Image (tube, rainbow, N blue to C red):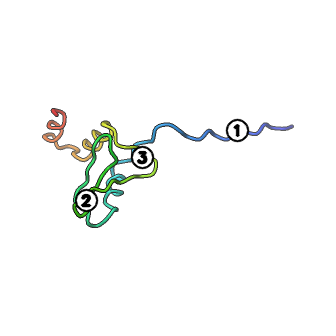
Amino acid sequence: METAAKPAPAPVTGEPRPVPTPALLLAMLKVSAKVSDLIMSPGSYPVVELSGKLVPVKISGMAPLTPDDTRRIAYELIADNKQAIDALQNQ
């Protein structure tokens, strides 16, 4: 009895998945030991300041940050700081 070969799974396409915040921060800090600032803005790739110059950090499979990405990152970084959360929500 012959069995039909299973088709190969279709390649995953579509929107890139968000990079977890710890992995994003690590990638940004690995650019150089001289990184002074981490900058995350909607519509842009993450950026680090290195010796006074802004350097974009591109991570494989990552699209520019969305407003939801930057909101999620901000909430993860401020965690349980009620004053910071209130300030973020009132912007």
Tell me where residue 67 appears, x and y as whole percent.
Answer: 30, 37
Residue type, mark 3 in image:
Met
Which of the marked residues, 2 or 3, is nearer the chain's N terminus? 2
Within 10 Å of disc 3 (Cα), the crowding (few <14, some 14-19, many 20+) is some
Residue with the most extreme bottom position: 33
Q: Residues within 10 Å of mark 1 (few under 14, many from 20)?
A: few
Image x and y of residue 71, in percent: 27, 39
Q: Secondary structure at mark 1?
A: loop
According to the image, label 3 marks what residue? 62
Mark 2 sits on what residue? 53
Q: Quadrant of residue 32?
A: bottom left
The residue most toward the top is 90
Q: Quadrant of the N terminus?
A: top right
Is residue 91 shown above or below 34? above
Residue that badge 1 annotates: 7
Q: Residue furthest front?
A: 53
Q: Image height check: is 30 above or below 11?
A: below
